[in-house]
Every structure is written in C-alpha cells, then in structure tokens.
Image (cartoon, helix red, strand yellow):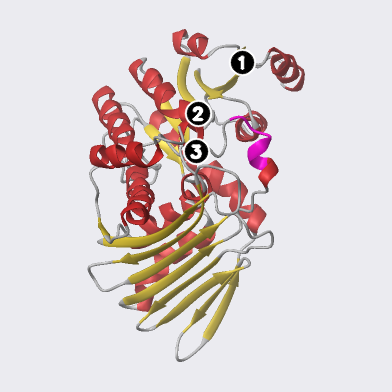
Amino acid sequence: MKQLTVIGLGNMGMKYLRDLATRPFYGWQVSGQTNSPGKVDQLQAEFPGMTVYQSFDEVIANPEVTAVLIATPNRFHFSMAKTALNAGKHVLLEKPAALSIAEIEELTDLANKQHLVCDVMFQTRFSPVFQWLKQHLPELGDLQRFHWEVPQYYRPQSYFTEGNWTGTWEKDGGGILLNQAIHQLDLVNFLFGLPEKLVSQVSFGRYRDIEVEDEAVLLLKYREGLLGTFVASLNEPLGQERLEIIGEKGSFRYEGQKLTWQTPEQTTTITFTDNDQRRKSHRAVIERFLQEITESGIESRTGSASGIPVSENQKDFQLIHGALLSTWEERWVELPIDGKQFMEKFAEHTKNLR
C-alpha cells in the first residue's frame, strides 16, 4: 500500500492529517512526522494504529513512503523537498514552495529529472468562485481593467512577537505578499497571466515591528492593454476581499461570498459558501496530487488529474520580487526578472536587517 506522510504537524499540518485520516483515499495509507515527543503520544491516541515518525530522516529512509506533504515553516520547504525528490518521493508543498525563483527552478528541474510529481498547495484555484470566473471570463469580451483588494489577512503585533521566525527575512522570507496574499497573486496569474511590467509601493514595517512587507500596492500592465491594481494589507481588522473585473461587455464583482455579473441587459447574483470553498479546494489539490501519482500522469500534466506543479509558483515570485524591486529602485520593472540578479539586489537591501 502506498503511504503519504504529512511533514510538520503545526496548525496546517494537523488539518491535513485529520482530513486525510478521517476521509482516506483508496489505496493510500496516511502517516505523520513530528519532532515533538508529546505530539507523538497525542496522535497515537487520536489515530490508533497510525505510523508517526519522529524525524524527517526516518521518513526519507523508509521505502514504503511514496509521497510527502510538507507543511513546515517556510525556510525548510526547499531543502526538505529537494531531499525528498532525491530520495525518489513525490512532493506536495505548502505555499510558498521555496523562497526564491532560483530555488523554484531547481525543484522544477529536479522533479522532471526524477520523473516525480512536485506540486504546490494553491488550493484557492479550485475554489468554486475562481473556477467559475476562469470559465466565464471570455464572456466579458476584451478585458479593460481589474481591481483586487486583499485586506482580510489582519495580523496583530502578537502574531509576530509570539513566534520566533515570523516577520523576518531570514526565517520567514517575506510578509503579506509572500505568506498571505500569495494566494491572490497566484490567482492573478491563473486568471490573467503574467503582466508585461509593474510598478509598486511596498511598505516594510509600517504598521508592525517587523522587517518584511506589511502593505503593498501594485499597478500591473499587460501587453493587451489590460491594467490591474492589487492592494494587500495586514492592518485592517475588518477587511474584506473585493475583486472587480471590467470588460467591454460587462463586469464581475466579487465581495462577501457574492459574485455579481452585470451586463447592459441584466444583473445576475451568485452566492458561494466560504466553508464549502475551503474544504473542497484543499481536498481538490491533495486528490489531484495523489491521482497523478496513482495514474502515473507525470509526463503530461494537462488532463483532469493535473494538480498545480511547483513551476507555477515561479510566476508568483515574479510578481512578489518584481514588486520589491520596483519599490527599492522606484521604477517600472519589466517581467520576467532574472532570479539571480534579484537575489543580489535582495542581499543589498536587506543586509543590515539579517
């Protein structure tokens, strides 16, 4: 029997483990890995008979482990994924898959070389509302502009002070763009593609005593004439996500689980349930990941079983790193940027903070 091991049993890791254990996939055994002895006892009491590993090395050394789901702090994602791939194991990564474009490229090349699946957990792509938008965007005709507000990720100062790694470049890798709004940036790429260039105003430690970005405003320009604005902040306690897309034939507006479709002839409102979206979208990513492995759908990732390959995360880093570079150098940045050159700029601008 094939075995999937969840690596890192914090908040997200435990959610994945419980979901997988209570609603197992046919033909897959689920196990967990934690460095906490106390959690081992807790898991064995909650899930009698489940294998619980006490080290990552133990997981890697076990030939019965076919795949791993890595849900550790960001800074461990790349090294753990690389080790797992080199050991011949399929990998599903919590976002972000790594901390740089170069690391994403390395994981992509390694997975291809090893003929293994390496996917990333961008579950929001499978939310019913965004699947609906992807399907119906052509009905707006030529797109003119979109505006996306992402203020729902409120984080008080205690969120950073109680942790020993959040809010720093070295251990967290970034702030609101990398850790929270990356889901919406991924959806920008999913719905509209990578823009031709961008300009931004990113704030670092404006509202919180942190090194990384806590607010960002981006203006995105596409070759076809489409303009997009993207605003993200972690300082709005009552913030609510809002997306507006304007085309030549009408508009879509999404806010508060409601989507409004307006044309000159009529207005239609569709309601999406948030709890259903969250549960089903996480499940969809895991299902597709395991189905790819089970059906050996590795060579072609365009069928119904296709998940979200790690290479897709590179596009998100183009937006994130492009936004940082634009603010630091006060200029428009053409995309795609060179990952190696960006890291040189990154080291220059963060050397006194790290």
Q: Amino acid at mark 1?
A: Asn
Q: Are marks 2 and 1 in contact (CB under 8 Å)?
A: no
Q: Amino acid at mark 3?
A: Glu
Q: Disc 3 designates what residue?
A: 287
Q: Disc 3 or 1, which lies upstream in sequence?
A: 1
Q: Tell me the mark number nearer the camera, choosing from 3 and 1.
A: 1
How far from the left and from the top, in percent, is residue 4? Answer: 51, 23
How far from the left and from the top, in percent, is residue 214? Answer: 53, 51
Q: Tell me the mark number nearer the camera, choosing from 2 and 3.
A: 2
Q: Disc 2 designates what residue?
A: 69
Q: Is residue 271 above or below residue 335?
A: below
Q: Amino acid at mark 2?
A: Leu
Rendered residue at 33%/56% (across/down): 326
Q: Is residue 223 above or below residue 269?
A: above
Is residue 334 one of those drawn in magenta?
no
Q: Is residue 83 above or below residue 177?
A: above
Rendered residue at 55%/80% (across/down): 268
Is residue 162 one of those drawn in magenta?
yes
